[in-house]
Amino acid sequence: MKLLAALLLFASFNASAIEWICNVGGKKVSKVDLIQAYSGQPVLINGAWMIVYMLPAKNPETGQAFGELGLSPDAIEKMAKNSSLVDRSVRIVPSPNQMDDKIRATNPSAGYSVLFVGGSDVVNKCF
Amino acid sequence: MWLTSVFEVAFAALAITGAASAETTLTTGVDVWDTSSPNARYMPNYSTPNEYKTANKFAKAEVSTDVNGIRLTGSGRYSDNEGGRIDRLDADIRIDGTFGVRLGILPYRVSWCRHYERDSVWIREPDPFCSFYGLAEMSEGSFGVQGYASTLKNGFMIDTMIGVYNPQVDNQDKKLGPYVSVGPTVSHKKAGFSANAIHLASGVQSRFSLLRTEQVQNDATGSKSAYQRDLTYDTIFYGIEGNITDDISLRYTSSNYIGSQNNPRNLYDWNGKSDTVELTYKKTARDSFSYGYNVYENITKYAASTNIQNLQVKGHNLSWRHDFDDGLFTVIQYSTTTDDYTTIKLVNTYREGRSIGFRLAKTW
């Protein structure tokens, strides 16, 4: 937990410097894809819909992170609920640890907080 | 039921052979209630399907996976007091990014009910149309097909959905809005429409839903006035919610069952309306405090009598939810209720109740 917190802290200083690009099976995923996914629009990667995770909207880091993407965490959170008319590929997780676990277990997927969970190892961990 | 079994087998096979990884969510917990009155509507101990237990264990699970771009989802829940049910067992075919079709056992998606949801601020929601088993049909579902569309316009994400259902396929035909089943179902059909809009910049959300039910049952209660019951009723939901400050959110919902018994031998109309206002103060990311006020009124008019029966239930609810690390959370809730109904008999029908409850749960 301490290691994760340190990584988050370290990466938060560099968040704005990180270019959001990952390569998955030759498919280039950009920051635009990330915004699209968190806006509730599907992003298809190798025949599967990308799942994106976020911490609860009230989490201070969430507000900061999604402000950088120009999105409202409250709106994203509402779209992610089970009662939504359209199933979005957005999931709410209660902690960075669970976000990390989910990203490891789900392919393709991404997590976005103040920075990408896992800090400098982001390119390997985000999908 | 055979179709349900076929779906279950198909899901198991896909889970084993599925190319994409499965996504799973599980919430487990226990609710403990201390309730003052044995009869007041709609306290936790009021008319539960299973024998009431003060400590109510529950679990809610969902698993989904993609196979060739088709999303397969299964979900279900169990609680000691309400038993188990399958909420979803469906295939979601997205035609493109803007519309798609779902087929299988599907939630009606009429309301914003949060029964046993992992992010709910309540143990039991203030709206009895969500929390009370006998009225919660609108928060459930049945076998059917749904078509949905989504569009981004003027800063609003607008979702629309139409659905048709045959509850007899998965044995959900005994659910009749506010009424209990009287015998074997002859036919039961549902069709509905929902629209939901979210303002992406502010998070303000609104919804309107309409679900029409036509249902015929043969009365097998053994009463002298046995008849074929022929019901038509509409389930109508509308709501709006959003933040009024950075920390305080407000939500208003109106749930309605409006219908008629059409058989000339026993004509009557009813109008059930449940209005709820909730105020939630999110003090921190870990602590939420909520107040909810609900008024439920049901007016039944009988054609063969001048008697009009009016049932009114009012409830106040307070809750405090605290989130710990790694998905562990607690909720403390205090609820009061009063209920009364008109009757031609000279008896006191007024009742009141109080409950205090504690939930300990974890999302895995």
Image: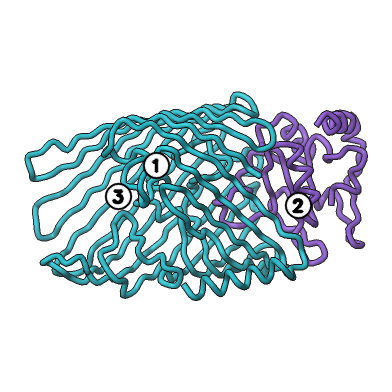
Chain colours: A purple, B cyan
Which of the labelled discs sits on residue B196, or is there none? none
Residue type of the residue flagged with mark 2: Gln
The amino acid pointed to by label 3 is Gly
Residue named by callout 3: B272
Q: Residue at x 69, y 36 (%)?
A: B326
- Rounded to the nearest angstrom, the CA distance separating label 3 from label 1 is 29 Å
Q: Nearer the viewer, mark 3 or mark 1?
A: 1
**Amino acid found under the numbered disc labelled 1:** Lys
Left or right for A67, reference B25: right
- Please tell me whether residue B32 is drawn above or below residue B1 in the rendered image: above
User: Mark 2 or 1, which is nearer the eye?
Assistant: 1
**Discs 2 and 1 lie in a common subunit:** no
- Judged from the image, the secondary structure of the residue bearing numbered disc 3 is strand
C-alpha distance separating marks 3 and 2: 41 Å
**Residue A61 shown left or right of residue B302 in the figure:** right
Q: Is label 3 in contact with label 2 (beta carbons under 8 Å)?
A: no
Q: Label for residue B53?
A: 1
Q: Residues within 10 Å of mark 3 (few under 14, many from 20)?
A: many
Q: Which sits in the foreground, B190 or B42?
A: B42
Q: Position of residue B130 (x, y in %)?
A: 42, 47
**Looking at the image, which residue sits at the far top?**
B283
Image check: A44 left or right of B275?
right
Determine which quarter of the picture holds residue B189. Answer: bottom left
| Mark in the foreground, 3 or 2 | 3
Chain ID, mark 1: B
Mark 1 lies on a secondary structure that is: loop
Q: Residues within 10 Å of mark 2 (few under 14, many from 20)?
A: few
Q: Which mark is residue A36?
A: 2
